[in-house]
Amino acid sequence: MTGTGFDLDRLLNTLAAWALALLWVLPLAYAVWTAFHPAAFEARFELLAPLTLDNFEKASNAAPFARYFLNTFLLVSLILAGQFFLCTLAAFAFARFEFPGRTFLFTLVLLQLLVMPDILMVENYQTMRLLNLVDTIPAIALPYIASGFGIFLLRQTFMTIPRELDEAARVEGASFLGVLWKVYIPLAKPTYLAYGLVSVSHHWNNFLWPLIVTNSVDTRPVTVGLSIFSAIDSGVEWSVINAATLMTSGPLLIAFLLFQRQFVQSFMRAGIK
Amino acid sequence: MKADAFPANSGKPIQLETVSRLWGETTAVDALSIDIPAGSFTALLGPSGCGKSTTLRMIAGLESVSSGRILIGGEDVTGRPSSKRDLSMVFQSYALFPHLSVAENIIFGLKVRRVARGDRDQRLKKVADLLGLSQLLDRKPGQLSGGQQQRVALGRAIIGEKPICLMDEPLSNLDAKLRHEMRVEIRALQQQLGFTMVYVTHDQVEAITMADQVVLLNKGRLEQAAPPRELYEKPANPFTARFIGTPPMNLFPANAFKKLSTAPDFQLGVRPEAIHPHDGGPLVADIRTVEYLGADILADCVVAGTSFQVRLPTAKPVAPGERIELGFEPDALHVFDADSGRRRDDLVAEFGTLLRS
Amino acid sequence: MKADAFPANSGKPIQLETVSRLWGETTAVDALSIDIPAGSFTALLGPSGCGKSTTLRMIAGLESVSSGRILIGGEDVTGRPSSKRDLSMVFQSYALFPHLSVAENIIFGLKVRRVARGDRDQRLKKVADLLGLSQLLDRKPGQLSGGQQQRVALGRAIIGEKPICLMDEPLSNLDAKLRHEMRVEIRALQQQLGFTMVYVTHDQVEAITMADQVVLLNKGRLEQAAPPRELYEKPANPFTARFIGTPPMNLFPANAFKKLSTAPDFQLGVRPEAIHPHDGGPLVADIRTVEYLGADILADCVVAGTSFQVRLPTAKPVAPGERIELGFEPDALHVFDADSGRRRDDLVAEFGTLLRS
Amino acid sequence: MRDFTFKRDWIYGWLLLLPALVFLFAFTHIPAVTTFLNSFFSTPRGRRPAKFIGVDNYERMLGDPVFWKVLWNNLWYALGTIPVSVGLAIVMALWVNEKLTGRSFVRMAYFTPTVLPLIAVANIWMFFYTPGFGLVDQITGALFGWPASNYLGNPDTALNAIIVVTIWKEAGFFMIFYLAALQAIPVTLKEAAQIEGAGRWTIFWRITFPLLMPTTLFVCVNAVINSFRLVDHIFILTDGGPDNASALLLFYIYEVAFRFWETAYGATLTVALLVLLSLLAIGQFFFFDRKVHYK
Amino acid sequence: QAVDLQFYFPVAVGGKAAETIQELTDAYVAQNPDVTIDAVYAGSYQDTVAKAITASRGGNPPQLSVILSVDMFTLIDEDLIIPFDDFLTTEEDKKWVDGFYPAFMENSQTGGKTYGIPFQRSTPVLYWNKEAFEAAGLDPDVAPATWAEMVEFGKKLTKKDASGNVTQWGVRIPSSGFPYWLFQGLAIENGATLANAEGNKTHFDDPKVVEALQYLVDLSTKDEVMAPGIIEWGATPKAFFEGQTAMMWTSTGNLTNVRDNAPFKFGVAMLPKKEQRGAPTGGGNFYLFKGASEEQSKAAVKFVQWITAPEQSAKWTIATGYVAPRAETWETETMKAYTADFAPALVARDQLEFAKAELSTYQNQRVTGIFNDALAAAITGKKDAATALKEAQKQADEILAEYR
Ligand SMILES: Nc1ncnc2c1ncn2[C@@H]1O[C@H](COP(=O)(O)OP(=O)(O)OP(=O)(O)O)[C@@H](O)[C@H]1O
Ligand SMILES: Nc1ncnc2c1ncn2[C@@H]1O[C@H](COP(=O)(O)OP(=O)(O)OP(=O)(O)O)[C@@H](O)[C@H]1O
Ligand SMILES: [Mg+2]
Ligand SMILES: [Mg+2]
């Protein structure tokens, strides 16, 4: 569409989009502001306030963040790999196979969306103990691996893939797993990307269960380190908390910034002409 | 013809035994029995919605059969998945994998069957050359025009050299020139490689020029299955008579002509191309409209109150409003029972003589 | 013809002035200038990928113009959105709204323009009757066959009675019978309502039978824009000569014939249907293959080492391997400059006489 | 024969599901059933083991004013968060899907809430809401001369303040799904509508929005579930107060189960929550699924 | 063969605490090769108790944990802890127990047994902004000593701008999260006790308690010296620094924070009195968990004795601001040097003389939860003080009846 001339509609839209974006980014902006300024400027926004990295130093001294990062990274990878694997298989079954009990089983899966794993903490802790997994990274990961959300999401995506593609692959001799691997998974790439991002950010930020099921520095994720700064007797030190927040969610933010081009491109590419 | 680079391969026969397919209430395919000889080229022809695609998909194993049996190479494959039926297929909607390049789309099946890389590349090159796709191998289907997409689909089907190839209107988006070329190529390929071809088309020219056997369907039922020439020259019923041949055969009740008013129970037919200008001929026609077709002229005229189409040579220009006299050979007449629709060859001579008298 | 129920409406002219469209490196449409008179029926014809759809989409305002101007009714609409261009369109891929029923799809535009309910229903009924969709009005597009879908798209376009209607291969999925009927209907509708039609097709028969003007494109460039008869009888260049007419015109270098070996810089052409058996005729042909077309036979033969196609009447059976003698009328010859490809009518008589001597 | 194909489908289907089901059962369903059973027993404490008490826990729940309060709070919370966050998500997705100046920044901005941990973000919001020197008061004070307002410390505004945080957190998350769905709508549909004279609004309401329905259903189911499950920030912002004004059902369950250690009563409340959610979400799903899938 | 100990600790006062505990543990292990101690940071107090109970129910309890002193009855009720007495058999040990401030021991002993050893303990104090006092024409070195004075000072300190919006409040008594704690200061000052020592009876509707609550409510409604509504605990120091309030009540745990960040001179005083001085204690004790072997428990007790010994305790106090729980700690050179440099640190210790046990009962969280709701209802004006407390008392009675 060549919109020559002045387009008021577009201008208004752009303005509104930007206004909302600025509003949305405010907490992050505030985090950046306080993290780089002394505590005295937590509530005072003066352009010439002195910059400092002390807050980061304080934050990083509070816990072995390097190790926690590694743990979180391992944890998130494990969860993501497990989720992709299990959810793909299950979603494929729900999307393209007819079998008795399908509706019932799908309802069971949906139920998982409703049951908050945190509520079942005591039972799950017992299970982990039974499996002798307490204080290991898999123990943090296992309850989340079969994700109702992931299954549901992938099922929806798989259902939108034209059946002819499936059929063409089958006629070409692909087995059902071949069809899954060669047709469904590549075409659902945007969904995997979106789901991956959501899952990563969720588990990157998960706190209570990891805290309870782990005991050692070798297994604990960054949020446990972060929690040192919150809910404290001595008043909130926003500058340090925000420095820690930036430190811990920085990788995620950067990953998103880097990814976003690919993110969008892969959406485009999957668009079926 | 570069097709001789491919090794010969022998086709397999296909039998459909009273195959039906229901979609809830509607019967898409109704107790259809067809015999498709090994290595033959069979065209499934019929109007839109008559069940051609459904029939083809049942042969492919993509649609379950509501009742009846399907045999391939003598084996009952009714319950076998398509991946085990050892056939290839070109879809009406192309069904190209949008995430794969043209090259990857074409060699998809070879990869699935783990054909060695060298062999694969060699075959790809041949097929791409054949179909004029060599320049496009790295593109994604989304970047191709409709016709180019269809050629990719065609490439994917023929590269596998399967004993059976199914095609669902593979040429419908190609331009006339390319379509003609592809028609010849596909036919040649099929004859050379010897596979059995089942070819769905709504284009009777395609069916007639390419097929050994044309299966004409209507509302899910078999109207006639015969070699093209027979279909054209001896249509078994009025439906076939009108469906085969462009423009379609002129059909009229026998009693439209006073001379035949004694025979109200019959329908008569004459093909537009069997009628020619003939001063003093039996048919006196008032010309209504004239359509220019390049090589010929198609005239729409009225004879004895009935609408008629006549194909005339361009050389003899006629104008709307004119009146001309026409004639036809006696054996150019077709006679059908008005009720059963059955062909009555026995009556042709009699009516022919009456009409021309 | 039920179309007379629609009120007459007057079309608008369209002008393309050196319009180009680039896709990155490739030039899909290359400095194209076309004049489409008000109320005319113009067909955009050309091989697959030549830029027909792109041109149409630029007229519709769906594709931006890289350079050049588009005028509709004398106004420059180059930067105007499609919703303001007051035209209708039928898409190659139907573009039916999957969530709306057939009826809702058809009246979509009327609803947008708040046409009164009664008027809307009445028009819907007419269009549905016309297109044989009355039984399907409540279905969703996903439940229709390809042909049925295309008819819905057609219905959506014609119900609005816009001054301009654009169609992108609207008939490609219909069977021959329906296609022929629709061809006549569309043409009649267009003439009755008087709107300007731009009609993309790759099927030259469609273009020739329906259009007042055929615009032949090749690789994004204009090859020839002329009425069908002129296109057929006086192709401006070898591309047009081969593209128009099925089977295509036989083209050969003048020096293939010893008699003409003095004129190496020309290309000659004769249409297959202009050649006829003629004992003692100038062309001696060895028949290679024979294709049965129903009304005629198409023979592939070799004349003076060059491949030739000849259309023969069914009445005279020929078999591969036979040798026959052929002739043609002197004015059936076409002469083109070998280099520039330009038509040389001035030389026809000379070469014709030489060749037949 | 038909049976044969069907049986093979069955086996494939079940095999594919098996691994996921093992995990689902081990970590969700079996514990959930245990929870359900626990709701019929008293809370075991020290030397007093659990004993069967029938529906006493349920009777207690029905008579528990806090339960009713948090239930109403939760309803209000759902009504406050779902329509706004879903609506905003659609608008955001539409904006970000278009060619917009600085689209990358805008997209990133919308998405930040999903990336930032709620623990940290809650603290930031606490600052925003702090009376006097908090950002909201600074801004409203500077712009309108409003007096300091204690958003979190006032029972009338505490829940609404939390609703705002939740909307902020959720809209960007839902936007992703809408973005994916928008990309999947064939461009020709919009083109066809344009040709028919439809403007942006008509295209949105008549074409885009209906075609987004499956996504909307999905997002709504999630939003409903989240409205019962997003409580992390409450711990930091208000801790449910004042006087339970901002406590939600799940928050109360946490309180009962992990602060009061009344696990049996906690289980009872959990069962109530699950029943409620199932009615809402599954009902919604099965009711709309039919209408929403047009293919 | 070394004894393995696992030890959970919460952190409630910023990053340094975790580090210090880790250092101390490491030092101990270095000195005692026959023990290994796995010191596990377990989040906030809430998180720690959740983790400890979950782990115990999962059959994997720690041997030792620092948990809120008020959770003693809950832990007994859950049958998770054992008294220290079995391992404190010698006279020396008994004397050691007696060496803790009695105010801290009130929450650590019940039924004649010692279940908790005070460790990270605190008490609330009053901070005031000397510059604000001066600006209001008050003596910057004198804090209000009585309730009446606090109101009086407060009125002078409350400043409004031209449009009538308050820019500085007189006093700030935070009421978010655990409002009962600071309120308990008022109650004690008014001569009331909130719960009996057995933890099975509360006195929420005691007229003295009602009076105390009325005073708190009046501070913002009648006297208008304190901001209305629930006042956030976490933002209170910041509000103090920003000049939003001239006085604040908060934990001694904030001393270090205030010293580092207050951009003005400030003073620290005991809470003002009504009938008497008074303040609750707060914070966490060591508990011994069930399920440990005899050897482990012994080793745990030895570790507790070591870490509460003067040197270690001093280090801990200086690092965190918690009140050292034993008198002898204050006599060490380190502490003396510290208090000499920073006299306000002594206020909390001196106040211990008047301090009482923090509200603690069976089903403590639930009972205090009810009490908190009542306070919040009164503060936000949803109920009057008497009604709110009466209802709370009724609910508490229902819960506690079974423990009598
Ligand atoms: N999934 C379906 N559900 C219901 N009816 C269907 C379905 N698919 C096809 N049909 C119906 O079955 C009949 C046969 O359809 P089929 O696709 O085989 O026709 P076709 O001969 O291939 O037509 P075309 O030439 O238009 O492609 C049609 O009436 C069609 O409406
Ligand atoms: N989105 C696109 N990106 C890049 N190239 C494109 C795109 N769309 C079309 N093209 C190219 O532009 C040229 C013209 O395409 P167009 O679709 O107009 O052809 P067409 O004449 O309609 O062909 P067909 O008869 O096959 O539909 C082709 O070479 C095609 O590959
Ligand atoms: Mg079909
Ligand atoms: Mg096209």
Image (cartoon, coloured by chain):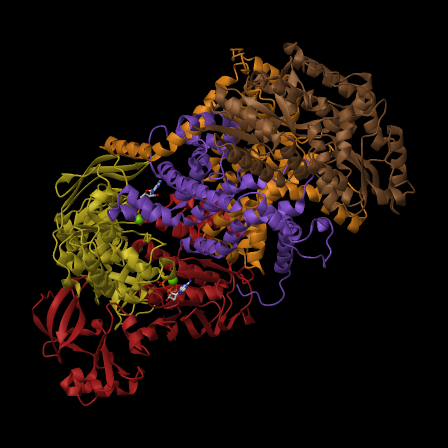
Chain colours: A purple, B yellow, C red, D orange, E brown
- Residue found at the very far left of the displayed protein: C322
Q: Nearer the viewer, residue B153 or B357?
A: B153
Residue D253 placed where, x, y %? 58, 26
Q: Is residue E258 visible?
A: yes
Q: Is residue E225 left or right of residue C127?
A: right
Residue A132 placed where, x, y %? 40, 29
Q: Nearer the viewer, residue C223 or E44?
A: E44
Residue E254 placed where, x, y %? 72, 38
- The residue located at (82%, 28%) in the rendering is E217
Q: Quadrant for the C terminus of chain D, please.
A: top left
Q: Nearer the viewer, residue D252 or B251?
A: D252
- The residue located at (27%, 57%) in the rendering is B106
- The residue located at (51%, 36%) in the rendering is E30
Q: Nearer the viewer, residue A36 or C38?
A: A36
Ligand 4 position by quadrant: bottom left
Residue E314 placed where, x, y %? 66, 35
Q: Quadrant of residue E149?
A: top right
Q: Is residue E161 left or right of residue E4?
A: right
Q: Quadrant for the N terminus of chain D, please.
A: top left
- Residue found at the very far right of the displayed protein: E137
